[in-house]
Amino acid sequence: MQIMTCSDIVSSGPSMKHFLKGDPNKDWRSKVTIIGHRGVGKNDVTSALTEGVELRPSIMENTVVSFNTAARSGADFVEFDVQVTKDGCPVIFHDDFIVVNDKETNCLSHRRVGDLTLEEFQQIGYQKDSKKIDKVLYRKTCDGSYSQWIMSVDDGLCTLRDAFEQVLPSVGFNIELKFDDYNVLSHQELKFSIDAILKVVKECCLGRKIFFTSFHPDAAVMLRRHESNHPVSSYHLHL
């Protein structure tokens, strides 16, 4: 069994507990905060054996539509995963690899977000300005196979700036800095991602409630050194 805990990085900056409560003079434990995971929830993609069988209507995770649906349903915050493209644009995507069908080889292609340009990232999956999907997303299912990642309510992949500009201002953001667990990053690579993310946050925040989280301890510590206006927490998994 895995148990996840969350620890404040409080060498400077506000505490998560009082931030969520909103009043440092009151007991933070009396406040129930609703956080929409990837908007209205993670997408479960079914295998080919069960394709077409849908347990419940689903909205594409980590998209503007999903975030706004969560906000209208009463969420105080939405949580989402931010990675940075090769050309320095923070985008919202959870998985370590983007999986698409390569038309030339008719095989599935696995690429990290950090190996894609923003233009390449935005060409994948649902396209708002076209009914045609040239590069269909795939996702690994629970049985280890891959199936097309198409939901009842689809929406295009989005950038962090898109989220700030298009998601209702009433909902706060839990911005998780996402890094591939199996890819060792240098100090400069971490700084490249963190600087790109903070640049967008500083330009677009406009008073929205924000806190940062990460499973990468070095990233959390580095982020706290550069960011003192918003809480920063590090997740820990206990096996």
Image (cartoon, helix red, strand yellow):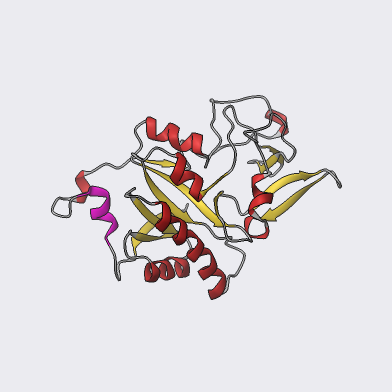
Magenta region: 14-22
Image spot of residue 35 (x, y percent): 37, 42
Q: Residue at x 46, y 61 (%)?
A: 199
Image spot of residue 18 (x, y percent): 23, 54
Q: Is residue 52 magenta?
A: no
Question: Looking at the image, which residue sits at the far left?
Answer: 25
Image spot of residue 175 (x, y percent): 43, 52
Q: Residue at x 62, y 66 (%)?
A: 183
The one of 99 and 53 positioned closer to us in this rendering = 99
**Residue 97 to residue 53: above or below:** below
Question: Looking at the image, which residue sits at the far right?
Answer: 105
The one of 197 and 44 positioned closer to us in this rendering = 197
**Total marks drawn?**
0
> Relative to 170, is 144 on the left or the right?
right
Image spot of residue 24 (x, y percent): 17, 55
* Residue 239 at least partly seen: no
* Residue 127 at least partly seen: yes
Locate residue 143: give its quadrant. Answer: top right
Question: Looking at the image, which residue sits at the far bottom?
Answer: 187
> Relative to 33, is 103 on the left or the right?
right
Q: Residue at x 57, y 56 (%)?
A: 89
